[in-house]
Amino acid sequence: MILKGKVHKFGNDVNTDYIISGRYKFKSLDMPELATHIFEDIRPGFFREIRKGDFIVGGRNFGCGSSREQAPLVIKESGVTAVLADSFARIFFRNCINVGLLAIECNTKMLNSGDELKIDLKRSIIKNCTRKEALKFKKLPEIMLGILEEGGLASYLRKNKRLERKG
């Protein structure tokens, strides 16, 4: 699978309340409405910058804070295809996979806002088309790729009736 999109870069320690503020996530479950408030506290109006297929890029400890699923759900609802970061808070990473949002741990130093990327999941390569550079990332386990392919854990379990490794 090849993914293409533009980078929207954030820094280190981006917590789930920066992704979607508590003042919204406790009042509504309407994901399209919540997505209009994505990153509102640190980048007002950010939802207008996102195009379907774009990528969020963070530094270290992306998704720290509360473990609620609204943060990755709002990112997915906004049209973002994947989140790339140097490292993730573990529960955020699993929540991403569980809701069907690709999360990739990689060195993000060569990625800047506005860069156009092409991600080859099978070969575990991120090509920065803007800077004409490429980097490898650790391949996700087949079970996680299967969950992502089905759109999340609930869809995967409905289809497969159990959690099992492919191949």
Image (cartoon, rainbow, N blue to C red):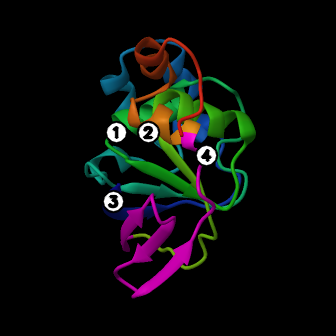
According to the picture, the residue beneath numbered tag 4 turns out to be 141
According to the picture, the residue beneath numbered tag 2 turns out to be 75
- First along the sequence among labels 3 and 2: 3
Q: Is residue 52 left or right of residue 81?
A: left
Q: Residue furthest bottom?
A: 132
Image coordinates of residue 165 in percent, x first then y, are 59, 33
- First along the sequence among labels 1 and 4: 1
According to the picture, the residue beneath numbered tag 3 turns out to be 2
Residue located 71% across and 33% down the image: 91
* Quadrant of residue 15 within the rendered picture: top right
CA distance for labels 3 and 1: 20 Å
- First along the sequence among labels 3 and 1: 3
Residue 36, compared with residue 27, is above or below; it is: below
Residue 145, compared with residue 83, is above or below; it is: above
Q: Residue furthest front?
A: 167
CA distance for labels 1 and 4: 26 Å
Closer to us: 35 or 40? 35
Q: Amino acid at mark 1?
A: Ser
Q: Is residue 149 left or right of residue 52?
A: right
Q: Say whether marks 1 and 2 touch (CB < 8 Å).
A: yes
According to the picture, the residue beneath numbered tag 1 turns out to be 78
Task: Please say whether residue 101 is one of the residues in the magenta stretch.
Answer: no
Q: Which residues are magenta?
A: 114-142
- First along the sequence among labels 4 and 2: 2
Q: Residues within 10 Å of mark 3 (few under 14, many from 20)?
A: few
Residue located 53% across and 36% down the image: 166
